[in-house]
Image (cartoon, coloured by chain):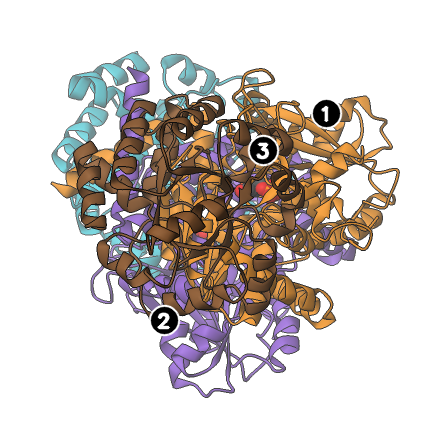
Chain colours: A cyan, B brown, C purple, D orange
Amino acid sequence: MSLATYIAQRRQQKPLLIMAHVVCGYPSFEANIRALEIMEDAGVDLVELQFPFSEPSADGPLFVRANEESLKAGTTIDQCFELMRLATQRFSFKIVMMGYYNTVYKMGEALFVKRLEDAGGAGYILPDLPIEESKVLHTASAAASIDPIILMTPTSSDQRLAQLGAASRGLVYVVARKGVTGGKTDMDDAVVALIKRCRQYTSVPIGVGFGITCREDLDALTGVADVAIIGTAALKAWESGGPEGLQAFFKALTV
Amino acid sequence: MSLATYIAQRRQQKPLLIMAHVVCGYPSFEANIRALEIMEDAGVDLVELQFPFSEPSADGPLFVRANEESLKAGTTIDQCFELMRLATQRFSFKIVMMGYYNTVYKMGEALFVKRLEDAGGAGYILPDLPIEESKVLHTASAAASIDPIILMTPTSSDQRLAQLGAASRGLVYVVARKGVTGGKTDMDDAVVALIKRCRQYTSVPIGVGFGITCREDLDALTGVADVAIIGTAALKAWESGGPEGLQAFFKALTV
Amino acid sequence: MNIFDFSEGREGYYGEYGGVFLPEVLHATIEELLACFRECKSDPNFWREYVELLQNYSGRPTPITHLPNLSRRLGGAQIYVKRDDLNHTGSHKINNVMGQGLLCRRLGKRRVIAETGAGQHGFATATMAARFGFDCKIYMGAVDVARQRPNVFWMENLGAQVIAVEDGQKTLKDAINECMRDWVLNMADTHYVLGTACGPHPFPEMVSWFQSIIGLEAREQIMALAGKLPDRVYACVGGGSNAIGIFQGFLSDDNVELIGCEAGGLGAGSNLHAARLAYNDASVGVAQGFKTYFLQNDQGNMKETHSIAAGLDYIGVNPIFSYLWEQGKVRFEAATDTEVKDALRLTMRTEGLIPALETTHAFVTAIKEAPTMAKDEVILINQSGRGDKDIFTIADALEDHKWKSFIRGKSDQYQREDN
Amino acid sequence: MNIFDFSEGREGYYGEYGGVFLPEVLHATIEELLACFRECKSDPNFWREYVELLQNYSGRPTPITHLPNLSRRLGGAQIYVKRDDLNHTGSHKINNVMGQGLLCRRLGKRRVIAETGAGQHGFATATMAARFGFDCKIYMGAVDVARQRPNVFWMENLGAQVIAVEDGQKTLKDAINECMRDWVLNMADTHYVLGTACGPHPFPEMVSWFQSIIGLEAREQIMALAGKLPDRVYACVGGGSNAIGIFQGFLSDDNVELIGCEAGGLGAGSNLHAARLAYNDASVGVAQGFKTYFLQNDQGNMKETHSIAAGLDYIGVNPIFSYLWEQGKVRFEAATDTEVKDALRLTMRTEGLIPALETTHAFVTAIKEAPTMAKDEVILINQSGRGDKDIFTIADALEDHKWKSFIRGKSDQYQREDN
Ligand SMILES: Cc1ncc(COP(=O)(O)O)c(C=O)c1O
Ligand SMILES: Cc1ncc(COP(=O)(O)O)c(C=O)c1O
């Protein structure tokens, strides 16, 4: 099932889906599985599996450290795909790969798409790959029903949004604010206006991320976006409270 | 009695006179007196009293330190003249002032000559005062029967020796080698040749200094020069053996 | 040869290298920068203002110095040195920085950020910011902060805020990442003054353009001094800005051989070096906003690098060089840390020059090759910086005991004063 | 006005100042030097060779930089700076040293000695000796060795032997005495490269002649840049070589006021300063080979002096200045240590320049006076050197805690390595 169809189906039952985030191999692959179980229990709809990279320049401090620690522990791409394979088999949510373009480039784009497909992945988010540079990858992806998740941002002009919209497939990731991952964003009128502006240029579902931390953020997005993307806040919950902390975090979100 | 007359008289009795050296106020004025007594006993014929100066650039390490220590202890020019006055009254040797020109310049040349005369001094050695700069001082000195002791050196050309000779009065100081005070000089053929060369340009007695340390040096100079000038070697003897050391030093020289 | 004529390929690409690989949020900023740069490049007044600024503020043109003693001693080619060490702040970095300062003013921005490795680029940027009245934040790997403290001291005293980056290898590449993180937040009022001919287009082109002033001057000067074009031109290659700067004076001269000198660190095979092209340990990848040869593992993660010279200690290389190297237009060699120490000693003693440790890599290679060349051949070395800034590193490298006891005495003094 | 026209007075005298007061053993050496200098001075090829050497080796002409920010902030005269800090080795000292290097070669000597205070002159001399292939010994007061260790490090690495002089006040004047002691022994093969316009004739004239290149360039440059002659020219005065250097460009211009800036140390009346003319604590004397104003007591012994800037910490002054001061041709002011720190901070932050502590004395006085001048008036400051060399002194003065903990860390590292 394609990402778009999956999201459309789920949206029948829920006004706002949730996409969560896991850094492969951090703090360990066992911990990843435990986190995914908790997410499954909490009714999470989509999960980004971040393949660690040595130069995570679009990430904030928490994810930077997670990337570093994971690599220091010896995490390989094989292990990341293996986690993805296990998770897509075992859990009901859809999984997308998140990472940096070099991971893909170094492997070769065709091979990347094939391995992603084999592992049951539905798409990928590559924050440092602009659409100008993604023709080959997008073409290969389309053939395999893998969706590139395009980012739209507060600094994108209408003209740019049109270009981005034209390339969008499966899900668009609206970046709620400037900056890197982590920190807090006010889900205020400006965010809502941005989402509405983005809607004009794409027909695929819209996810909103960067700085979502609490129930109120979800409320603000409900009826405006299709998916709320939760990254740093969940990792923070795990770091401070372990599995129970993560459980409590999702509980507070969804109740 | 003028310096020249005094030397001529003494030379009647001795083939080679001795001029010794004392740094005023080093290690103390009491020690100076003791040293002068020893010199008197040893039959020294002339003594240079060095007025300490803060920039003794023609002196070697031992005298440099002596100048410094003396000034640190508060030695004044008044005290130096007072020592000279006492010594000229009490001892039979002739005394000349040795020092740097700034001591004279700062006091005023006329006053310097007057004070030197009052204290019984017979002349002065100012190693940093070239004859070109000494007209006023020499004129004032002549009027007071004070003799400027001119230096002749191994680097002086014949033409220069002629100029120096023309200005010489009382005693000429032949510098046995290049460099500053201290160290050892071989009283070899070169020194003898230098003295002979100097003789051609002056009729006043010739003293030879810089590096005279032992009996053999005196032997080498006997019959060639009129005065052997002993500086550092005597101070060294005092430093290592006190009054007894100095006594022994002169004993070894004159026996 | 005009490497910046993109009419037959994709703009910002040199062969398959270069490009723009940045977060979407920077798209507009990069477009704005590109437009402004194009405007500057086509405006002869801009270049004139740039040259004048460097003349009046930084002392350009820097001279070329003949090294008769070293040449005689080596017994081969005549060695000449382009003296960019005489620039204000002590290296070629000021050229690029002053250019970007003018451009930043034209963009209407009032804050600059910059990464720095050796500290030279940070020093230059802090200087430029003081002069232009910009706010300034400098990102510097914590390891580099430690080994280049004098430069940090000056940056701070020039009014810049220096941030010690504790991520990753804590060197230049991590400082670049941190700059990107600042930029994606503050692009509205902030210009990122990238310090070398790397990163996303238009930086490689822009930095190369500003640094081309070295080659422009050098070509004319060496013709006047040596009466001919140089047979070989040597420059050290960190990111590759001073090298592309001087090489641009000779790119169209077929008989001039261009040699880029990389950091050989502990040597080939040691895995502790930063020789991207000379040692063949690197492969093509995409990071820090552009595509080039990187020292990376088979997973696409960057390797640890090492050099005695902080300013050469970088994973990637000017994309233009990746292209020119493959085209056989530029030869690449590496100099090891040990060779650098020896060449530095030799250069100081024979000619009274103190090249920066970075620069000394170029001297090493020239010194190796000069004896094999004819006496009427001409070598030109680009002296990208002076070694004064490296006193701690050089004193450590040369194991200077007096220096060590001086530092101990200083430390004791501070201890006493604080008690 | 030609201060070196001795036809109406005694050669080597400026009014009653100057002269030669040296041990007789040096008479022939000084005569030989004088004859050689006269030959050089009357040989246009010599000056041409000199200028060329400085151009090709040291980066002359140094530019003049306008300081718009500082001028605006002070609200008075327009401030311009002559950038001798951009010279190779970082100060104007190289001008004199290169000139004496040429002269030494002409004398056929192969060994040079020099005194040094701040270390700049020693650094420059060691550089020149390396370049000319001379043996080199540098005398430096032990106190200065301690406070200027980086310069000592470079001198030694350039191949010079550095002797820490333990006599007297252990600063510049004692180093000069020690040089004299070396010279009276080794004059046959040794040239004494005196570092400032002091000492016996012909040194004041000779050093002034070499440094006049600053004023020659500056006059033309300021006319071109500011469109007029400067109203006031400021230069710091240690021995007085950089000041006489720039002033010579304007000595015949009656409307240009010349201001020499001395080391005020802890201030007037403190007895801890080196202001010979500005504070009226000095009197005329004869020492170190010449007659001038010295800071001396009533017995003619030299006083202890003090300055934050080692290079200004000297008892005497250029005899030409004693004369020009009495003639009312040059005004003298002093800047205190505290004022110097403030002016340095201000200059770094507003213009991105780091003047040497010595130089900053000139900035202090200009900064004080600029606000009282009209907006169309022009100030020219001679930036005799750059402050990089002073990092230890400046860090101490500014009480930089990060610097201190860096030094402690370095010290601990050395301790560990040695165990
Ligand atoms: C003096 C000097 N030379 C060379 C480099 C290397 O940079 P690039 O290759 O960009 O010239 C640096 C970098 O800091 C440097 O400081
Ligand atoms: C940078 C600088 N300026 C000025 C001076 C003072 O010397 P002078 O008065 O001879 O120029 C020195 C002396 O070391 C110096 O290093």
User: For this rendering, which residue is in front, C55 or D367?
Assistant: D367
Amino acid type, mark 3: Val
Residue behind mark 2: C333
The answer for which chain carries disc 2 is C
Tell me the SS state at disc 3: helix
Answer few, some or many: residues within 10 Å of disc 1's Cα (few below 14, many 20 plus, some between 14 and 19).
Answer: few
Amino acid type, mark 2: Glu
Q: State the CA–CA distance, disc 3 to disc 1.
A: 60 Å
- B242 up-or-down from A98: above or below: above
Q: State the CA–CA distance, disc 3 to disc 2.
A: 77 Å
Amino acid type, mark 1: Arg
Q: Name which residue lies at 54% across and 64% down.
A: B201
Tell me the SS state at disc 1: helix
**Does residue D198 appear in the picture of this structure?**
yes
**Are both tags, 3 and 1, on one chain?**
no
Q: Nearer the viewer, mark 3 or mark 1?
A: 3
Residue behind mark 1: D73
Res A217 quadrant in image: top left
From the top left corner, tell me how far across and down residue C16 is, in percent: 46, 66
Q: Nearer the viewer, mark 1 or mark 2?
A: 1
**Does residue A138 appear in the picture of this structure?**
no
Answer few, some or many: residues within 10 Å of disc 2's Cα (few below 14, many 20 plus, some between 14 and 19).
Answer: many
- Give residue B113's mark: 3
The answer to whether the residues at label 3 and label 1 have Cβ atoms under 8 Å apart is no
Tell me the SS state at disc 2: strand
